[in-house]
Amino acid sequence: MKIDILTLFPNMFSKILEESILKRAQEKEAVTIRVINFREYSNDPHQKVDDTPYGGGPGMVLSCQPIFDCIESIRTKDSKVIMLTPDGTTYRQSIAYSLAKEKHLILLCGHYEGFDERIRSLCDLEISIGDYVLTGGEIPAMVLADSIVRLLPGVIEEESHKEDSFNNQRLDYPSYTKPFIFRGMKVPEVLLSGNHKKIDEFRRQMSYNKTKERRPDLLEK
């Protein structure tokens, strides 16, 4: 897979791409990630990428020209262009699985007061990571990259992400490790029984109970 991240602040990605699973996935050549500063595509002598909004109002709006030229220069028939925006589809694990099957993702990060509305015509999908507003689309792009790359073949064990929260509309079951007793709190005896059928039943029940308590809306779906 290829992931191109279009941003005005490429340095924000330097550390996250050099750590943990994202780093290992690139080393294994499971994914190639590029961070592209779309300011470099501006035709303005001062590389300006925004302007005041028609009709008045606060802030600045990202202009069409640099973003159109940037996307059109890297887009292929295999590309899926995703705009990170508060009014997009709320991101879910099912979307991560779907995007992990793509060959080329282009993640467009906004800033300032948002995009010229015509830029939406370039995009195949608009995604929000929640009902709140961030300074820009960089952190949402990091969220997508991390959640998608870990699902690629060979990056982590498939069994690991199959048991993740939100698969099958359930939260993950609780996990424990040594010691057996810590400050009076014990590990459930069934996990030491060696009876895998009972352990699986216990985990399924705990997953259901946690979901019912914390996210009953998932069960309704």
Image (cartoon, rainbow, N blue to C red):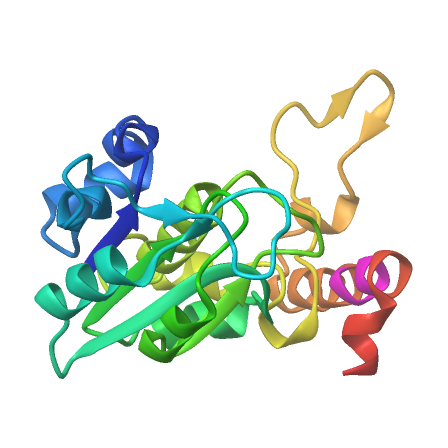
What stretch of residues is rendered in magenta? 207-211
| Residue at figure coordinates x 65%, y 65% from the top left | 200
Measured as percent of width and height from the top left, residue 49 is found at 30, 46
Which of the pair 85/63 is nearer the observer? 63
Vertically, is 45 above or below 125?
A: above
| Residue at figure coordinates x 31%, y 75% from the top left | 122
Is the N terminus in the top left, top right, bottom left or bottom right quadrant? Answer: bottom left
Decide if residue 1 is in sight here.
no
Decide if residue 28 is in sight here.
yes
Measured as percent of width and height from the top left, residue 94 is found at 52, 74
Q: Residue furthest top?
A: 183
Query: Which image quadrant is residue 147 in?
Result: bottom left
Query: Which image quadrant is residue 205 in?
Result: bottom right
> Is 97 part of what is drawn in magenta?
no
Query: Which image quadrant is residue 69 in?
Result: bottom left
Measured as percent of width and height from the top left, residue 138 is found at 42, 43
Q: For this view, does 76 lie left or right of residue 147?
A: left
| Residue at figure coordinates x 31%, y 52% from the top left | 156
Vertically, is 202 above or below 59?
A: below
Task: Please give the count of numbered marks on the rendered protein.
Answer: 0
Vertically, is 152 above or below 114?
A: below
Q: For this view, does 67 lie left or right of residue 27?
A: right
Which of the pair 170/197 is nearer the observer? 170
- Considering the whole magenta stretch, tell me its main secondary structure: helix
Is the C terminus in the top left, top right, bottom left or bottom right quadrant? Answer: bottom right
Which of the pair 48/188 is nearer the observer? 48
Q: Residue furthest front?
A: 55
Measured as percent of width and height from the top left, residue 2 is found at 16, 61
